[in-house]
Structure formats: structure tokens, C-alpha cells
Image: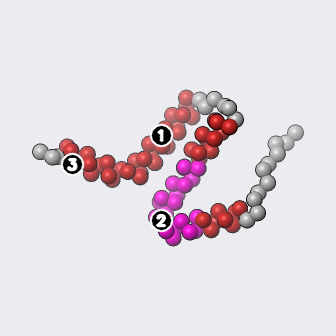
Amino acid sequence: MAPRRAPDLPGGRTRHFRSIYYLLKKIEATRVALITLITLLLALMLYGLLNVETLTHGILMGTAVILLGLVCFQYGDFCLMRLRRILFRA
């Protein structure tokens, strides 16, 4: 028996396109591109929680690496400035 697919919501793709286009006008394109990574992590966590599946060590390590990359991208400049201030205070 083939798995059933959830029906598409009316206008779902159009809403998605319009929301991405709106975000591109308001936010930098590199930040909008991060949405794909955040969506992937959210889907992975929901999969583990809702399907009561065990997430392997490799999946959790990969998730941690992606999260670390997102944090470095978001707060990297701020952290580097503070680290330089601490190290070169003398």
C-alpha cells in the first residue's frame, strides 16, 4: 500500500513564494537562505518527537554542527570583537 500524502493547502505555494519575496525585500539574502537550514533542523526534531523514533548519534552530531554553524554566522562578528577586546586589552 502506497503511503498517503497530505493534501496541499490552497494557495500554499503562492503564500510560500510571496513570504520569501517579502523577506528578501526586508532582510539580507544570506539570512533568508538560512531558513532552509532552520527548517531542516525543525523537521528533524519534530520527526524524532512525533514519530517516537530514536535519533542516532550521527544525526545528533550533524544537527549540532549545523546549529554551531548557524550561531557562528549569526553572532560570529560580535563574538570575535569581544574576544579581541579581551585578548588585546593589555
Do the residues bearing badges 3 and 1 touch, measured as CB atoms within 8 Å?
A: no
Residue 57 position by quadrant = top right
Query: Mark 3 or mark 1: which is in front?
Result: 3
Q: Position of residue 56 (x, y in %)?
A: 59, 29
Label 2 to label 1, Cα distance in Å? Answer: 24 Å
The residue that label 3 is drawn on is 85
| Residue drawn at x 79%, y 48% as measured from the top left | 5
The mark closer to the camera, 2 or 1, is: 2
Magenta part of the chain: 20-39
Q: Secondary structure at mark 2?
A: loop
Q: Residue at x 54, y 65 (%)?
A: 23
Screen quadrant of the C terminus: top left
Q: Is residue 52 above or below residue 83?
A: above
| Residue sitting nearer the eye, 41 or 62 | 41
Which residue has dot 2 on it? 27
Callout 1: helix, strand or loop? helix
Magenta segment main secondary structure: helix
The residue labelled by disc 1 is 65
x and y, in percent, of residue 69 in the image: 44, 46
Is 21 part of what is drawn in magenta? yes
> Measuring 31% from the left and 48% from the top, which residue is drawn there?
79
Image quadrant holding the N terminus, namely top right
